[in-house]
């Protein structure tokens, strides 16, 4: 596990990035690899590498060279099938000097060139320099578990594990207006965009090839494809369980102790239960908050007792929540307004005191149909199955009904095609609301620019599978995996996600919607497969997912902090602050009558917590990246010894 930086010049004589600057760009991500540092320079390429040691420090030192120094590679991630690949390569006559997956990757590349990426089972971002052909290759894993940023100019190409390394080499950051518009809709910046005008991400399942003097070419080597043809629960249960057991076994390969995050839900519990079969002494980690209804500690401890594993829990206070926010935003690179990132940061901090590797349950919801919203097509079926003309009449009637009338929203949603009503697992500001919030609103950056091309690819599929496809291409890679990578790497902790495995996806992609989601529950087939493995009190428990008491805190403990941040932020040129402050005041007052009648509602009338949080997070990001012209003092002074 590590972080890297690479720079490819277009001309030998060009020195746009000095060696000293490049050293700092590399050391800026020391948190990704505190155990070792390495560099390689030649006439065209600079490669920098920071390493978190999971196996012997001398095994797989990077930048790694192969075939008489023809190939040089930096690699962030883990390849879980490297022993099997190594056996095949040895049969073909390839010799190995180390026990690392790093050498296997580059040997496979030597044999198959870019086709090697198809064979890798794991999480990775890889950069390989072919000195003989003067060509740089790079690839990112299928699901986007590991990040890969790049910036191309007429002077050259910069690649990095984190955007901050690229920004260090430029004078000033320019906000990408399209990214800002989408962020306010989705609560994250959809890939391949970033909040920076000139920096992008390589999409998951993609690679690029950049030859000196030629333009960058990007190729797709894999994409998630659904083939829902298994409709029998009995047939699916064993296939799911076999795939999960196999994946957990591969993800447990490590020379250091492996722990696991543990919430109150079925996903992380399943991982712990299966991992315990391999390592009975696995440690588990949980966080929560003091406020009732916002802690999973009690359930997690009950689960740990049932599974007979150790559980280490930590309770987060509002004070340390705010104190750590600037650091959390800095590690994120771009703002991600998912409050769950904060408890993830703290649980990673606690885990890092005990282990170097943790397992987690990310990806189960997207693959197996786990979000409550996935039940909507079933509940709306009576309305959505009506004729087009009937739905037009009903929708027209519903739109003229006063807000709050029972059935209004139900009819409107039932009469609206899935392609227009569902844009992903999180939705914040509407286009009308963004027009009020933004000083410069651009209709051309409509949120459907992101989802429309995706829906066109799956027009033949059912609505539930369409929703999964949208979330895999937006929510999973732009929110879930970003916060998972950054919050664990902030503490030099390697996170592994066994659900996001090609073999697990192969099974999940074949499940018919009738066994993924029912009127009563989500992840139906997965829950049935895990009966007898996961404790009974968890099997059918609804998803919480590290809940955060933001709604309450912004009304009370964090109100003054939020108001001061809004007033002091130099974002007046972007936002109408009067609109934001009005939302804050409405949120503080709330609507007590509504909340007393609808106490189960997650987003009650007057609850603007998610909208406010997205703006507050952006303001912290703006202060660090724009107002302070990218504060370079974040470079750890102690690492100057490497310069």
Image (cartoon, rainbow, N blue to C red):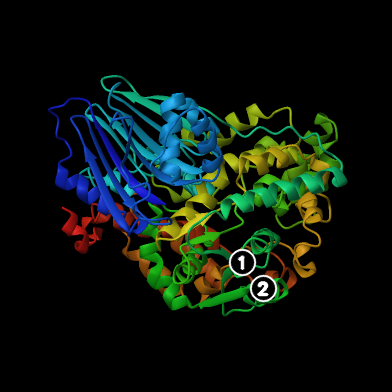
Q: Nearer the viewer, mark 1 or mark 2?
A: 2
Q: Position of residue 604 (x, y in %)?
A: 65, 64
**130 above or below 58?**
above
**200 above or below 364?**
above
Q: Position of residue 620 (x, y in %)?
A: 36, 60
Front-lying residue, 634 or 284: 284
**For mark 1, what is the residue?**
262
Query: Which residue is at a point 80% across and 34% down the rendered structure image?
Result: 229
Q: Please rate how many residues cluster around mark 2, counting C-alpha atoms within 10 Å: few if below 14, some from 14 to 19, many from 20.
A: many
258 horizontally vs 508: left or right: left
Q: Position of residue 615 (x, y in %)?
A: 44, 57
Label 2 SS: helix
Front-lying residue, 192 or 406: 192
Answer yes or no: is residue 143 visible: no
Instruction: Tell me the number on the disc at residue 252.
Output: none
Front-lying residue, 68 or 23: 68
Label 1 SS: loop
User: Residue most toward the left?
Assistant: 13
123 horizontally vs 592: left or right: left
Answer yes or no: is residue 598 visible: yes
Query: Which residue is at a point 37% across and 36% down the rendered structure image?
Result: 127
The answer to which quarter of the image holds residue 301 is bottom right
**For mark 2, what is the residue?**
304
The answer to which quarter of the image holds residue 154 is top left
Query: Which residue is at a point 66% across and 78% down the rendered structure image?
Result: 298
47 horizontally vs 388: left or right: left
Q: Give the alpha-carbon distance from disc 1 to disc 2, as whole Å.
A: 8 Å
Kindly indicate whether the residue at mark 2 contacts the one at mark 1 (C-beta within 8 angstroms).
yes
Query: Which residue is at a point 73% across and 68% down the rendered structure image?
Result: 598
């Amino acid at each position: 596990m590590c972080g890297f930086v690479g720079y490819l010049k277009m001309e030998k004589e060009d020195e746009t990035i000095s060696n000293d600057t490049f050293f700092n760009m590399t050391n800026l991500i020391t948190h990704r690899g505190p155990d070792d540092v390495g560099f390689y320079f030649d006439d065209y390429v600079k490669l920098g590498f920071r390493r978190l040691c999971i196996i012997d420090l001398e095994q797989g030192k990077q930048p790694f060279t192969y075939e008489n120094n023809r190939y040089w590679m930096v690699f962030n991630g883990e390849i879980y099938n490297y022993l099997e690949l190594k056996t095949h390569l040895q049969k073909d006559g390839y010799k190995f000097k180390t026990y690392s997956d790093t050498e296997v990757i580059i040997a496979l590349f030597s044999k198959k060139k870019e086709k090697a990426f198809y064979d890798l089972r794991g999480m990775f971002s890889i950069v390989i320099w072919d000195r003989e052909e003067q060509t740089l290759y790079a690839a990112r894993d299928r699901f986007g578990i590991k990040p890969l940023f790049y910036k191309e100019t007429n002077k050259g190409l910069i690649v990095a594990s984190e955007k901050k390394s690229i920004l260090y080499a430029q004078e000033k950051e320019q906000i990408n207006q399209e990214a800002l518009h989408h962020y306010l809709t989705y609560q994250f910046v959809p890939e391949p965009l970033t909040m920076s005008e000139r920096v992008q991400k390589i999409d998951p399942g993609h690679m690029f090839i950049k030859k000196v003097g030629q333009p960058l070419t990007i190729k797709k080597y894999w994409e998630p494809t659904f083939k829902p043809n298994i409709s029998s629960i009995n047939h699916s249960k064993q296939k799911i369980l076999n795939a999960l057991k196999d994946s957990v076994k591969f993800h447990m390969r490590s020379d250091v102790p492996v722990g696991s995050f543990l919430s109150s839900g079925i996903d992380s519990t399943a991982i712990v239960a299966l991992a315990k079969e391999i390592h009975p002494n696995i440690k588990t980690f949980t966080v929560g908050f003091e406020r009732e209804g916002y802690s999973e500690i009690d359930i997690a401890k009950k689960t740990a007792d049932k599974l007979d594993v150790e559980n280490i829990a930590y309770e987060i206070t509002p004070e340390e929540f705010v104190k750590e926010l600037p650091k959390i935003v800095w590690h994120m690179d771009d703002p991600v307004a998912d409050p769950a990132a904060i408890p993830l940061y703290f649980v990673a901090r606690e885990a890092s005191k005990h282990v170097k590797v943790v397992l987690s349950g990310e990806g189960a919801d997207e693959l197996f149909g786990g979000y409550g919203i996935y039940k909507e097509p079933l509940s709306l079926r009576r309305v959505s199955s009506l004729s087009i003309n009937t739905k037009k009449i009903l929708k027209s009637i519903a739109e003229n009904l006063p807000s709050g009338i029972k059935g209004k929203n139900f009819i409107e949603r039932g009469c609206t095609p899935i392609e227009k009503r569902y844009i992903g697992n999180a939705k914040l500001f509407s286009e009308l609301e963004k027009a009020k919030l933004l000083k410069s609103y651009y209709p051309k950056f409509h949120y459907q620019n992101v989802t429309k091309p995706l829906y066109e690819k799956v027009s033949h599929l059912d609505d539930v599978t369409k929703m999964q496809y949208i979330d895999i291409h937006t929510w999973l890679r732009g929110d879930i995996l970003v916060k998972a990578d950054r919050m664990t790497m902030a503490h030099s902790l390697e996170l592994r996600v066994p659900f996001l495995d090609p073999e697990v996806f192969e099974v999940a992609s074949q499940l018919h919607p009738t066994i993924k989601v029912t009127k009563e529950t989500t992840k139906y087939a997965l829950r049935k497969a895990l009966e007898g493995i996961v404790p009974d009190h968890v099997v059918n428990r609804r998803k919480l997912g590290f809940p955060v008491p933001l709604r309450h805190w912004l009304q009370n403990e964090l109100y003054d902090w939020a108001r001061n941040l809004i007033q002091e932020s130099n974002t007046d040129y972007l936002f109408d602050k009067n609109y934001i402050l009005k939302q804050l005041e409405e949120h503080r007052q709330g609507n007590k009558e509504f909340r007393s009648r609808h106490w189960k509602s997650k987003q009650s009338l007057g609850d603007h917590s998610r909208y406010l949080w997205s703006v507050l997070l952006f303001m912290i990001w703006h202060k660090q990246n724009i107002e302070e012209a990218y504060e370079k003092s974040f470079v750890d002074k102690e690492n100057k010894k490497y310069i």
